[in-house]
Amino acid sequence: MPELARVDGPHMGQTQLRAATDRRATLIAQARPVIDYIYSQIRDSGCVMLLSDENGYLLESAGDTDFCTRAAQVALQPGACWAENTRGTNAVGTALIEGRPIVVNGTEHYLRHNNFLACAAAPLVEPGGRMLGVIDISCDARRYHPHTFGLVRAAAQMIENRIFELTFVNQMKLRFHLSSACLGSVMEGTLALSEDGRIIGANRTGFHLLGLTPADIGERDIASALGIGLRELLDLNRHAQGRPVALHRRGSESMFIMVEHVRPPQFLPGNLPAVAPKTTTEDALGALDTGDARVHTAIAQARRVLGRKVPILLQGETGAGKDVFARAIHASSGRAQKPFVAVNCAALPESLIESELFGHAPGSFTGARREGALGRIREAHGGTLFLDEIGDMPLHMQTRLLRVLEDGYVTPIGGKPVPVDFLLISATHCDLKARIGTQEFRADLYYRLNGLTIALPPARERTDLPELIERILAREALERGDGTQLQLAPELAGAFARYPWPGNLRQLAGMLRTACLMLDTGDTELRLEHLSEEAQAELNRKHTAPPPTARPVTLRARADALIGNAVAETGGNVAAAARKLGISRNTLYRRLAAGAIPPEATKTLQPRKLNS
Ligand SMILES: Nc1ncnc2c1ncn2[C@@H]1O[C@H](COP(=O)(O)OP(=O)(O)OP(=O)(O)O)[C@@H](O)[C@H]1O
C-alpha cells in the first residue's frame, strides 16, 4: 500500500472560492440544475455529488449531511483541489488527466486515508473540446453500486448538452440517433449547422455517432458527414412535419433525424409587416423591444442571464446597435449603478492598448503618467466592461485578457495583481470562428467570452423599422424641445422600406437626424427634400433595379461596390466616405485593406489616409 503522501492538497479560502465560482458562472449555471436533479434521485443513500473546475478544484456540492461530514475530514468539499498531482489517483483528478469517465474504488485511491471512498467521475468538455471540469459522485466504498457510474456519465452528458444548446442557441440544429425513441432525450446526437450546411458544433454523442473529431468542426459539411445535402435534408424535414425522418445510409445503419431550423422572418422591401404589440416593460432592455422577433429573442436571452456573471458576446454588423444593446443590458442589470466602461479595441493604437486596458503603476515605463493609471478593466470594477470590436484585439493582448478572465485578477504594468469583478460584454461584427481558423484569434479566449452569444439582426432584415423610426423621431422631437411627434411622408417611408441600409441603424438614425434639422418650425412631416442631396441620391440609387448580370452578385460584392462608389465620390477622403456610408473609419479601412476598392478609386486614395 502506498505511503500516506500529503494529507492536504491546496485549498482555497472563501474569497478565492467565490471568485473561482464567479469565473465559472456559465458552467455552474448549467451544472447546478443537473446536480440538483440527479442528487434528488440518490438523496439519503450516503453520497455527495461534486463539481470541479478544469484544475481539479471542487466548486459545488450537494450531499447527505452525515456523509458530507466524513468527506470534509479528507477535504472532499468545495475549495479543495483534487488534481491527481496533489492527491494521487482519485476519480476527479484522474478523470481530468485521462479525459474519460472513471471509477476509483477503495484502495485504488493513492492516499490511504481516502480508501474509505468510492468515487465515479466524468469529465465535462465544451463543444470546442476544451476541458471545463469534472462531475463526481462519491460515497462510502462499502455502499458503492455500479449504477452510480451510469448516473455520473448521464449527468455529464446532460450538462454538456445544456452548454451546447446555450452556445448554439441561434443556429440551425440537426438532432439524430439510431433509434427514433432517443430523439429529444439526453442520448440524442446534435450538430449545429451554419446556413450553408457546415458543421459548426457537435455534442458528445454527435461526435461519436458520426465518427467526427474536433478538427472536423468548421471544416466538414453535413453532406460529407451524413451523405445528404442540406437542401435535401430540409425538404425531408419539411415533409415530415415535426416527426423524425429515417435516413437510409449506404453502408451504415439508418439514422433518425430532425432539423430545428429557426429562420427569422425576412424583411420584405415595400411590404412592411404589421408591428407587434408594444411591450409594457419599461426597463432599458424592454425599451429596445420594438416588434422584431429576432430582437425580441435577443432581449429574452439577455434577460435569462441578467444578474449572473455570464460573459455575453454580441454579434452583428457595424451600426446594428451592439453598443446600444450592451448599455441596455448594463442598465437593466443589478450593476446599473456601477460603471459601464466601453473600450473600442479597433480604435486603440497597439502601443497604448496594454496600459489603457490593464493600467500601469506610477513611473513604470517611459512616457507613463507619473501618478499611474487604473486601466479600463479596473475602472469597470463592480460594473460592466464592454469590449467593442474584440476581433481586432492583438493576439498578445488576447493572452493577457484571457488570464484576467480566468484568474479574476488584473496585473497593471509594473504593478501587482489586483482582484477585479465585472460583467464582460464583448461585441464583434466579424466571424470570430473564421479568425480562429486563420490564427488571428485565440480559441480559448473565444470560448471564455462566449458564455452566451446574442445575434443582432442587420437593419435590412428587421421587421420593426416603422416602429424604430417612430422612436428615433420621438427622441429627436424631444431634443428639439417641442415634443411634437414627427412623421415620414409616404414617399420617404417607401424609399426607406426599399433601401438596404448598409450602415444599419446608425445610418438610419443619422439620416433622420439631418432631416429633422432641415424641418421648418411648425412642420411635422419629413420629406425626401429634407435629406441631404447625397442621401437622396443614395436612396434613389437603390430604387433602380441592378443591371442584369450574367453572374450572381454576392452581398459582399454589393457592399464592396457601395464602398468603392463612396470612396470615388469623396475623392479618396476616407473619413468623408465612412460618414457617407454610415460606418466607422476603422471598418472602412478594414474593408479597403481586404480589397474592397475598385482600381479607379485606388488612384484617388492617399496612402497616408490608409495608414492613419
Ligand atoms: N434600438 C435602437 N433604437 C434607435 N436607434 C438605435 C438603436 N440601436 C442603435 N441605434 C442607432 O444606431 C447607432 C449605432 O448603434 P451602435 O453604436 O450601438 O451600433 P454598433 O453595432 O455598436 O456599431 P459598431 O459596430 O460600429 O460599433 C446609435 O448611435 C443609434 O443612433
Image (spheres, helix red, strand yellow):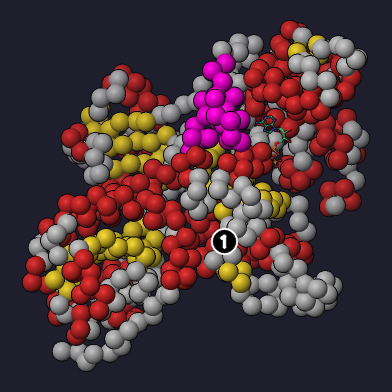
Residue at the far bottom: name it.
3
Is residue 538 covered in magenta?
Answer: no
| Along the viewing direction, whichever of 473 and 553 lies nearer the viewer | 473
Is residue 289 covered in magenta?
Answer: yes
Residue 413 in percent (x, y) is at: 70, 74
Query: Which residue in the structure is indicated by mark 1?
Result: 421
Which amino acid does the dot numbered 1 rest on? Asp
Q: Bounds of the magenta span?
A: 275-301
Residue 539, above or below 351: above
45 with respect to 505 (left or right): left
| Along the viewing direction, whichever of 215 and 402 lies nearer the viewer | 402
Residue at the far top: name it.
490
Q: Quadrant of residue 240?
A: top left
Q: How many neighbours does mark 1 have within 10 angstroms: few (below 14), some (14-19), or many (20 or more)?
A: many
Q: Residue at x 86, y 32 (%)?
A: 568
Q: Secondary structure at mark 1?
A: loop
312 with respect to 214 (left or right): right
Q: Residue at x 72, y 17 (%)?
A: 496
| Along the viewing direction, whichever of 75 and 459 lies nearer the viewer | 75
Q: Is residue 365 at least partly visible in the picture? A: no
